[in-house]
Image: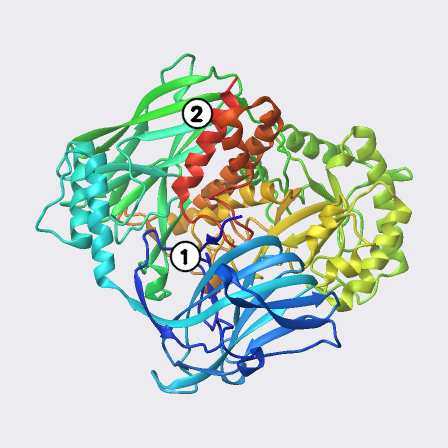
Amino acid sequence: MPHREWKLPVVLFFAMALCATAQEPVFEQAKPNLLPGGDFEGSALADHWKWNDNNGAFDVKPCAGREGGQGAALISTGTKERGKFFTLGFDVPAGADLRVSLWAKAENHLGGTWVNYEGPGGEGAGKFDLAGGTHDWIRYEHRATVPVKQAAAGAPLKFQIWFYVYGQGTLKLDDVECRVIERDAQAEAGWYAARADELARTFPKAAPEKEAKGVARYEAVVRAASTGVSGRAEFGLLATNGSQRVLRERPFLMQDLHAGIELDAARHELEGAQLLIFAHRQELKDVSIEVGALKGPGAFDAANVSAHPVVYLKNARARPWYEGRNEQALADPLLPNRTFSVAQETVQPVYLRVYVPAETAPGAYEGEVRVRTGAFEAKLPLRLRVHAATLPKRLTLRTMCVAGKADLPYQDLALQNRLGLGNIANGMSWTKPNFPAKGDGFDFSEVEKKLSYALDRGLNAFALASTPKPGKWGFPKEYSPEWKAQMTKVLKVYGAWLKEKGWLEHAYYNNIDEPGKGNWPHVKEVYTLAKAANPEVRVFSCVNTVGAVEELKAHADVFDVYVQQSDQQQANAWKARGKELWWAICIWPRERPNLFLHCPLVDARIVGWSAFKYGIDGFEYWDLTSWPKDAPKDGSWARCADGVLVADWKDEKPAVAGDGYLVYPGDEGRPINSLRFEALRDGLEDHELLVQLKRKLPNLSGEAKAEAEKLLGGAGLVENMFLYTQDAAALSRAHARVLALLDAP
């Protein structure tokens, strides 16, 4: 297995975890290594490192490093206590920007490892994760800013790097480094000059201005390319993929640009792209978008293509230079089609969503998107290739949102995006059943209507009941005999009715959500009650305390673990036993992949690809509508007076803005979709196409089979749960290749 080098998709202040929004490379030059002994050569380990032996259960020894050198092997025999391996204190300048890098190799390392940074008195704790399992040498990179609290900027502080090792097996380390980094303007200028030449080859009429340098030269090419497509000097048109973050204040700094919209889609699939409108010489007013009918081998109604102007949300939180361009507004909400304005020297994205009905004839379809502003009109070609594959009504990967508004418009949008609202048929409130009594049982007529509607539209998982956490949200500290009797009746009677309807296979009983160690006895108590009431009901346990899977493995049918903790929870051992395993994303752990507003849209789409690689059975997200407390409850926040789509959206948790909501409040009780939700859906549908490709693999041969095996293994896209591509266009290309292979005879 060859060595691989990946950059961590996590960027971290010591004070808090942040997600990068950079759409272009970050150029840096590194100073000499500050960390002594990180190469493990020429001195004893104890000269620069310390570790605990954990009563003989954890040890560190010299070992063969990469490329014939020497490394350090962290060996754990497996106990409930974590092993610790850490540096002696070393000097770093306060306020400096750092790059921490290391190489790691795992051998049956069950439990994972996380790396922590600490200054004086534990100041500025932050972490990133290393993958477990068995893999060859992988290089990790991580960037951080040293806080200035206990010393003046530039003064030295004592810092340490800690490795916290869980579970058992061996993790080998080599070439651990910590370097101060600075921006490299010369390398940046060179990259943009080369990119300008590349774009000029794509757009022959956009020859770069020889006198312009670096970014200015690149901007000149993009400007010429966009006006060449529109045919107007006043504004330009280009297209990019649906998962690309568009930078409003620096409209030229994007890498995946095209003269038209080109999409590949299966039947019964939704796929999207972004139309980019550049305002060059003046503000554009009263801009309107119209999509015409597509012509091809069969009928394709224009109603299946919808245009959604994207709103930028103001965000004043500054980010360091190594995270990329510091945007003050982030694109996310998708408005229904309407007129708008574009401020001078900015770019306005319009998301184009295409739905391919299941009965559509495969083949190439062509149409156009018309853009009008004042007396000007321009057109952009739209090309759609419909492939023979057809996505099912219900995806293989189960999905569930456990909270949020369950009104019909919200439910419809969630199901359109392949994330079912799991709370629509909850049989038990905190204190009593949610159904009217009927004889000795319950009246299920209303819930039957709800479930019939949702299951017919793709719902594949829901909670038949949920368990309150003792002592929280007004619930007593213990479960009373009355509560136990009520829950027993719901599980028995409701479960039997669901089985009779053929729906029990989609139902789960949610045990205590995210139980701490103090709640583990209650988790066991509830599981025992559930199995006594109805052995056929699956008990679902969402956990975020490390060690919970091991401790509760005899008291759960399904575990739902956070992606970033999957290794630490030894969830792979649970999966290896043939058990059902789900992944979740939430406010904590904050590391990527995540669905915060600041995170690249790649994070949302990669969920499906990573879940396939690891054989995950389901994906859970906690809420669609947990909006900031001061957010309007209607669409008034998006009524921009001047028509320029930049809106105030104040989140009281700016570092994790976007957590708990993937839609926005709209008028008349209708939700407004988001780019994040669209990208998440694309990834969930990608997962289903990979399932189909895996089924077809035995029928492929030669180069087609070799390519399919690479795609199924996530080659070049997903190295592990923490290391994955940052290129949205690469995921779009991989999606198209999967479809092409499914077309192969």
Provide residue 103's location: percent of width, then percent of height: 50, 62
| Element type at mark 2 | helix
Q: Is residue 126 above or below residue 694?
A: below
Estimate the spatial distance between the alpha carbons at disc 1 and disc 2, rounded to whole Å. Answer: 30 Å
Residue at the (22%, 47%) spot, across then down = 194
Residue 620 vertical position relative to residue 230 in the rendered view, above or below: below
Q: Residue at x 42, y 60 (%)?
A: 650
- Type of amino acid at the residue the image marks with label 1: Trp
Q: Which mark is residue 614?
A: none
Residue under circle 2? 304
The residue sitting at 20% across, 35% down in the picture is 203
Q: Is residue 169 left or right of residue 481?
A: left
**Which is more foreground, mark 1 or mark 2?**
2
Residue occupying the far left of the picture: 211
**Which disc number belongs to residue 649?**
1
Placement of 608 over or under 142, stated as above or below: above
Evaluate whether residue 285 shows in this view: no
Where does residue 718 sit, x and y in percent of width and height?
A: 51, 46
Q: Give the residue type at disc 2.
A: Asn
